[in-house]
Image (spheres, helix red, strand yellow):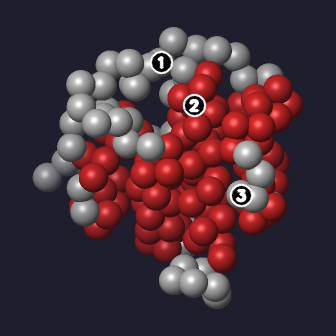
C-alpha cells in the first residue's frame, strides 16, 4: 500500500477513468467500450495501470481504440450536459468505488464486478450528467445497484 489506497484500488481507478475517456472520445456508451475491449484487454489495463498511468492518457486511449477496433458512436452525454461536466477522473472514481463494493458484496473478482457494473442499469444513472446520481453517496449508489431500484 502506497498512499491512502491499496495499489489495486488505484489501478481500478485508472482502468475506469480510461474506459470513460475512451467512451467520451469515441462517443460510445461505457458498456460498448467495455465489451469491445473485452476481458483480456481490461485485465491487461488493470494489471499494467501503474505503467499506463505514467503515460499520456490520450495516447493510451488511442492505442486501445485502434487495437480493439472501437468504432465511433453517437452517444454524447457531454454535449447534452447543461451543467458542469465531471471529468473522466471524477467518473472513474465513482465507478471504482461501485465496482469495489460489488466485488466485496458479491464475493467476486474485480474484473467480473467491472463487467457486471458496466452492463447494468446503473450506468445510465451515473452517465446522466444532468442528474445528480453520479455524485451521490457511494453507499447509496452501491445499494441502488444491489437492490435494482432507486430509493
Relative image position of residue 71 (x, y in whole percent):
70, 16
Distance between the Cα atoms at labels 3 and 1?
A: 26 Å
Quadrant containing the N terminus is bottom right
Name the one closer to the observer, 127 or 82.
Answer: 82
| Disc 3 and disc 2 in contact, CB within 8 angstroms | no
The answer to whether 39 appears left or right of 143 in the picture is right
- Look at the picture and state if 28 lies above or below 83: above
Q: Residue at x 54, y 80 (%)?
A: 5
Element marked by disc 3: loop
- Front label number (3 vs 2): 3
Neighbourhood count class around disc 2 (C-alpha, 10 Å): few under 14, some 14–19, many 20 upward: many
Residue that badge 1 annotates: 75
SS under mark 1 = loop
Which of discs 3 and 1 lies nearer the camera? The answer is 3
Could you tell me residue 44's position as x and y percent? 81, 54
Q: Which residue is mark 3?
A: 53
Q: Counting residues from the N terminus, which is met first, the one under dot 3 or under dot 1?
A: 3
Nearer to me, 75 or 31 = 75
Mark 3 surroundings: few (<14), some (14-19) or many (≥20) residues within 10 A? some
Neighbours of disc 1 within 10 Å: few (<14), some (14-19), many (20+): some
Residue toward you, 13 or 58: 58
Q: In the rendered structure, are the residues bearing label 2 and label 1 in contact, judged by CB atoms less than 8 Å apart? A: yes
**Residue for badge 2:** 23
User: At which x and y percent is residue 149?
Assistant: 23, 47
Which residue shows up at 69% across the image and 44% down it? 57
Q: Residue at x 51, y 12 (%)?
A: 74
Give the Cα separation between the discs numbered 2 and 1: 9 Å
Badge 2 element = helix
- Residue 9, quarter of picture: bottom right
Amino acid at each position: 500500500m502506497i498512499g491512502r489506497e491499496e495499489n489495486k484500488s488505484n489501478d481500478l481507478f485508472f482502468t475506469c477513468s480510461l474506459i470513460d475517456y475512451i467512451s467520451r472520445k469515441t462517443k460510445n456508451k461505457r458498456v460498448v467500450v467495455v465489451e469491445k475491449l473485452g476481458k483480456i484487454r481490461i485485465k491487461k489495463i488493470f494489471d499494467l495501470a501503474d505503467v499506463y498511468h505514467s503515460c499520456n492518457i490520450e495516447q493510451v486511449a488511442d492505442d486501445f481504440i485502434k487495437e480493439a477496433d472501437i468504432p465511433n458512436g453517437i452517444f454524447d452525454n457531454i454535449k447534452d450536459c447543461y451543467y458542469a461536466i465531471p471529468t473522466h477522473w471524477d467518473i472513474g472514481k465513482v465507478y471504482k468505488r461501485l465496482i469495489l463494493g460489488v466485488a466485496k458484496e458479491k464475493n467476486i473478482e474485480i474484473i467480473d464486478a467491472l463487467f457486471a457494473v458496466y452492463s447494468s442499469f446503473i450506468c445510465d444513472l451515473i452517465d446522466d450528467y444532468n442528474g445528480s446520481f453520479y455524485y451521490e453517496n457511494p453507499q447509496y449508489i452501491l445499494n441502488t445497484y444491489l437492490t435494482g431500484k432507486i430509493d
